Structure formats: C-alpha cells, structure tokens
Image (spheres, helix red, strand yellow):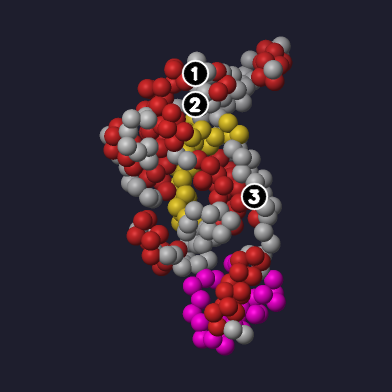
Amino acid sequence: MILILIKKIYQGMEYKNIRLPNGMDGKMTDSYVCIDLETTGLNPKTDRIIEIGIVRVQDNEVAQEWETLVNPGRNLEERIIELTGIKDEQLILAPTVEEVLPTLLEIVGDNPLLGHGVLFDYSFVKKAAVNRKMVFEKDGIDTLRIARKYLTDLESRGLGYLCKYYGINHSAHRALGDARATVELYRKLTELFYEKEEMQGDKSLFRPKRLCYHAKRETPITIPQKEQLYKLADKHKLILDYDIAKLTRSEASRRIDRILAEYGR
C-alpha cells in the first residue's frame, strides 16, 4: 500500500528527473554497496573490526572500491592470523574504527548493502556506529540466503565454495577480495534465479530488506577502571595484549574480574 501511494505521488508530479528510492520501483536493485569485514571474532558485542572492504556499484557498474585495516586495540589470536594473514604489526599504525567510520558511512550513503551473510557485517558496523552516537539503519540483500534457497544440492553455500563452483576469482578471507567476489556471485545468482524469484513480488530475496540488529551503546572505560587495571598489571607483572584506553566500560570490568580471579588483589 505504501509503495502504491508513493508511486502515485511521484507519478502526479511534473518533475521528470525524480526517481523512486533504489529497489522501491519493483525493478532489480542496480545500485548497492557490498561490504565485507575481517574481525577478531564472531561477536559484535565483544569482538572488533580489523579490516573493511567495500565495493560500491552504481547502475550495475563498479563505481568505487575502498579498503582499510583497522586497529582493534588488542592483539590477534593465532587462529585469526592464520585465517586472514593479517598480523599485529600491520595493525599498530592502522586507523581506529572511530577514524574510518565517517568515510565508510559516506561511501555507503543511501544505498542498500550487499553481503554474503550480510547481517554479520552490518551488526559490527552498526555496533561501532552506535557506540559513537552515529546512525546506521540499512536495507540489505544477502547472497547466502539466495544460495541456501536455490543451491540446496551443493555440499556448501560458503563464499569460497560457491566462487570455486562458478569459476569466480576470489582472494579468500581478505575484506576487499571477499567483497569483489560477492558482487560477482550476486551477478551470477541474478543471471540464474532473478526471474524465478521475482514471481514472488515483495518476498523476493533480490529486493533489499530491512536489516535488524539491536545495538546498545557502550560507554568508554572509566578513569577508576583504567587506574585499577594499570595497578593490577604492574603488581602482578602482567603483559597485557590489549590497549587499556580503548576498552569499553563492560570490557574493562570483565578484564578486571578475570585478573582478580586468577591472581587476586
């Protein structure tokens, strides 16, 4: 009903250059931003972004690519180093998420997001944005959901497997490489399944849908918490693998409790 009303309003105007928001005119979404992240883990509440890769597509053509490493304020676990090839020394001089967020939000603009498991990437960015009092509410298209619906006979619907299956070049587990591969996968899935999916109208997986992730703002570490952590580290001769100043209040509380439980006061 809302879409019909908007269409009528737009049709009643004399201005010929007014366009409906991307994806609202019932046609295929031809402008979007594919985003991929590498992170310290899987939980946006406790883990951090270490790399961002973005491919912005405008009218079905790649208009912009952007990538950056991000300093997470902590050392990486060995499994993350092995998975991504990213090392701690590469992140020491990298910008923080506070420094890169404005650029990321500017590139994304009003476009919907594209991703393979897009809610994962969205949740990390939204969490980072909310913590810094920024708004990040987006619609998105998920190639993983499309693959799960139409490629049930394959042994995997993972990005790496699908790229190999369709002969798509893929630099696995690096953000920009994954984003580029996801764009190509989306194009392939569109070629194969778009017409069949569009018969479902608004339920089509090729149309952007509102991404839902509730992110609660976390406050920075307090001065008393900083002082306590520094004192505990000094007293027990601890080598900390994280930057105390970059902890949130809840993270600092967990770190303090862990030290007290293991070493005492």
User: Which mark sits nearer the N-terminus, 2 or 3?
Assistant: 2
Quarter of the figure with residue 170: top left
Quarter of the figure with residue 184: top left
Closest to the observer, 261 or 140: 261
Amino acid type of the residue that numbered disc 1 sits on in the rendered structure: Glu
The residues bearing labels 2 and 3 have C-alpha atoms spaced at a distance of: 26 Å
Question: Could you tell me residue 175's position as x and y percent?
Answer: 42, 48
Query: Which residue occupies 54% across, 35% down?
Result: 140
Quarter of the figure with residue 4: top right
How many labels sit on residues? 3
- In contact (CB < 8 Å): disc 1 and disc 2: yes
The residues bearing labels 1 and 3 have C-alpha atoms spaced at a distance of: 32 Å
Closest to the observer, 1 or 59: 1
Amino acid type of the residue that numbered disc 2 sits on in the rendered structure: Phe
Q: Label 2 belongs to which residue?
A: 206
Q: Vertically, is 162 above or below 175?
A: above
How many residues crowd around disc 2 within 10 Å: few (fewer than 14), some, or many (20 or more)?
Answer: many
Q: Does dot 1 land on a helix, a strand or a loop?
A: helix
Q: Does the magenta stretch include residue 225?
A: yes
Q: Label 3 belongs to which residue?
A: 215
Say if residue 143 shows up in the picture. Answer: no
Amino acid type of the residue that numbered disc 3 sits on in the rendered structure: Ala
Question: Could you tell me residue 254's position as x and y percent?
Answer: 60, 69
Question: Could you tell me residue 138's position as x and y percent?
Answer: 60, 38
User: Which mark sits nearer the N-terminus, 1 or 3?
Assistant: 1
Q: Does dot 2 land on a helix, a strand or a loop?
A: loop
Q: Vertically, is 170 above or below 219?
A: above
The residues bearing labels 1 and 2 have C-alpha atoms spaced at a distance of: 8 Å
Which residue range is magenta in the image?
Answer: 222-247
Left or right of residue 127: residue 40: left
Q: Label 1 belongs to which residue?
A: 198
